[in-house]
Structure formats: structure tokens, C-alpha cells
Amino acid sequence: MKRILLLFLVLACCLAACQPKGEAPPARPQEISVSAAASLTESFTELVRQFEVLHPEYKVVLNFAGSQALAEQINNGAPVDVFVSASQKTMQSVVDANHISPDAVQLFLSNVLVVAVPANNPGQITQLTDLARPGLKLVIAASEVPVGMYTKEFLLKASGTAGYPSTYSEDVLANVVSYEDNVKSVITKVLLGEADAGIVYSTDAASSPAGTVQTVAIPAEVNVPASYFIAPVTGSKFQAEARTFIEYVLSDSGQAILSSYGFLTVR
């Protein structure tokens, strides 16, 4: 037994001697918590992958959901370093709660609405007025969600415009079978065939698997562009890290990645 113990001590000493003197174990990457609108899922996942290649000292933890849900989490004290919202109204709710400085908010992206329908187009939707046809099954986001808010604005804007009846908005809303809490839930129901159509961002339709959806464009005169805002959260313990991430998002490289996913850059 003593021989075994002695052998163990000798091996331990040898291993210790082999370790470079004065060299500390590698530091763990510093985590940056980013809460971002659900419509940014694919683009921000790629953007973060590239960011971490350039900055191996950081590990970005992404939390995707409807902007309104993320804002509520931050206002209730969730530990978040960066907030990315798909609407100014939702970002403002966090500013009003004193969790984000108004001077730190930056507009950096835009998006547009489209009508998404399953590949086999069971509702035979070829134009926007088809959305008002009685019996159609339509899915949209709740009005508390940015994409839902933009959808309601589009319907009201179209009502009475040349080519649309004055009752267009109420006729279309009468066909809504489900109000979802984020845009990904809307496009998912379309992909599963649970709806004849859904109103989503163009980027969500474009990121769907090839051949799974068709789209009907919404003309610029009645479309309502979505605006995306980014800002560090004032309660974050990692302000410098948050700024480094935001700087990358706003850089030419970051903007190029977002543009490749169909977003309209505004910087």
C-alpha cells in the first residue's frame, strides 16, 4: 500500500513539473446575453457565429421571442445585456421603464410584410383582396407583437384605397382563426397547413425551406415597413462587451450578413 502511495506521489510531482510555470488555465469566454426579435433568428445566429470567430473571448447567448415578451422580461429584471426590438414602440416601453437610455437606441434595419401561403395554396390566394373572402383561414400575430401591429396598420391603410373595399380590414380580420405571439408561430402554422395564409415579414417567408411556401407581395403604397432598434440594457454588468457586440452588428460586416437574409439596412 505504501509503495502504491509513493508511486502516486512521484507521478503527481512529475505531472506538476511538466506544467509550464506561471501559465494560468485558459479563461472562459465572457458571456453576452442578447434578447432579439424572433424574426432575427436565422440572421442573428449566423451573425453571432461570425462575431465569435473574430472575438473568441466572448460567448453570445441568444434569446429569441416576440419583442413584447422580451421587453417584459427586461422590465421585470431579466439579466440582459443587449435588446433588439422589431418596433420603436416596444423599445420605448423599455426606455420608459428606465432600463435603456434613450440616447443609446439605434435604428439599424427595416423589413416589409408579405402574405405567405402553403406551397399547394389551398385557399387559391393570388391577390390581397382574396384575404377577405369568407371562409378563408388566416393566421396573424397579436396586435401586441410588432408584426401584428404592422399587419393591423396595413389592413387599415388598405381599406378604402383604390382596389380595396372600405370594409377590407374588418372583412380580413373576420377570417383570422389564430392570433400568435410571434412571427415564427405564424409562419409555422402556414408551413403545417393549419392556415390558408399568414401575414409575416418577407425575411421569414424567405428563410422557410425551399418549396414550402408561396408569397403574395404587399404593394409599397399599402405596406407598413418594420423598423428594428438595438441598444444596451442599462442594468447590464457588461457594458463594454455589449458595446463591442453592437458595434459589430452596425459594422459593414454585420450589416452585410443581415442584408444577405433579406433585411433592408438603414445605416
Image (spheres, rainbow, N blue to C red):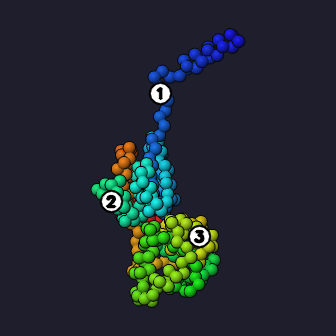
Q: Which residue is pictured at 53% across the width and 65% down the height? A: 184
Q: Which residue is pictured at 54% across the width and 81% down the height? A: 175
Of residue 127 and residue 173, the one placed in the foreground of this image is: 173
Quarter that holds the C terminus:
bottom left
Of residue 46 and residue 32, the one placed in the foreground of this image is: 32
Identify the element where label 2 is drawn.
helix
Badge 3 amino acid:
Lys
Q: Which residue is pictured at 38% across the width and 43% down the height? A: 237
Identify the element where label 1 is drawn.
loop
Q: Is residue 26 above or below residue 144?
A: above
Task: Look at the numbered discs 1 and 3 and tell me whether their residues touch, using CB distance below 8 Å.
Answer: no
Distance Cα–Cα, label 2 vs label 3: 34 Å
> Is 189 left or right of 183, judged from the image as shown?
right
Task: Look at the numbered discs 2 and 3 and tell me whether their residues touch, using CB distance below 8 Å.
Answer: no
Identify the element where label 3 is drawn.
helix
The disc label shown at residue 24, or none: 1
Residue matched to label 2: 96
Badge 1 amino acid:
Ala
Quarter that holds the N terminus:
top right
Distance Cα–Cα, label 1 vs label 3: 52 Å
Residue matched to label 3: 189
Q: Is residue 89 above or below residue 102?
A: below
Q: Is residue 151 above or below residue 62?
A: below
Q: Nearer the viewer, mark 1 or mark 3?
A: 3
Answer whether residue 51 is visible to the viewer in this image. no
Mark 1 crowdedness (10 Å alpha carbons): few <14, some 14-19, many ≥20: few
